[in-house]
Amino acid sequence: MLSFTIENRNVTVFPSDGAGRPVIYLNTVENEGARVREALRDAPDFTLVAVDGLDWNCDMSPWAIPAIAKNAAPCTGGADAYLKILTERIAIEAEERLPGQAAWRGIAGYSLAGLFAVYALYHTRRFSRVASMSGSLWFPGFREYVFSQALPSRPERMYFSLGNKEDRTRNPYLQSVRRNTEEIEKFYREQGIETTLQLHPGNHYANAIERTAAGIAWLLEG
């Protein structure tokens, strides 16, 4: 395990055992990288690069929106600036410490980080596989963004998941999460991208580590 810090973001690299393995980037909210890597101990060999210390509602949001609930914070739309740090600084330093070139690169995340993972595809060619677990695809304007914007390159695999109770809420924003996720997954599938959508028991917060590991494991299968 290797650790370093770039612009207040803490990076932990869980290196693969061999050279030329996949590298998956995981943005985390509570420094859960070690627990996710442990849950993937039986997965095919890969490197996990976990990032925490994020300004969550800024770094993970594509554009600014007001708070969606009384006690929530607004999102301030810093995804482009953070993606530049991730691809031009964090990824370069992380991969300099690995043996050989990456076989391929993926990006994964839960909640707002799942939204960011999909958004990143539209602004970099670095990632060829994406896992969005309980992704915040309710985000205002994001469904329309996906349907109207061209990808710079077509990803190989895309994983989506949700808890089966996530849309059972009075919050009008969150009510759309299942519909949006299903429509976005179908949109990519109809373009010939290999996709899957998994529904898990529970609400947004149930078994987040296990759900995250399941998405990364699916990326590693193909």
Image (spheres, rainbow, N blue to C red):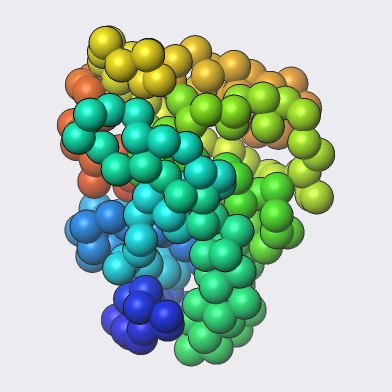
Question: Residue 209 location, x and y as percent?
Answer: 24, 46
Instruction: Tell me: residue 165, above or below residue 214.
Output: above
Q: Nearer the viewer, residue 178 or 201?
A: 178
User: Residue at (22%, 57%) from the top-left corner?
Assistant: 30
Give the image quarter of residue 125: bottom right
Does residue 46 appear in this view? no
Q: Nearer the viewer, residue 132 or 198?
A: 132
**Quarter placement of the C terminus:** top right
User: Residue at (55%, 73%) from the top-left corner?
Assistant: 85
Question: Residue 123 location, x and y as percent?
Answer: 70, 55
Instruction: Tell me: residue 172, above or below residue 71.
Output: above
Instruction: Tell me: residue 3, above or below residue 68.
Output: below
In the image: residue 136, left or right of residue 128: left
Give the image quarter of residue 51: bottom left
Question: Residue 213 location, x and y as percent?
Answer: 33, 47
Question: Residue 218 location, x and y as percent?
Answer: 46, 42
Give the image quarter of residue 9: bottom left
**Quarter placement of the N terminus:** bottom left
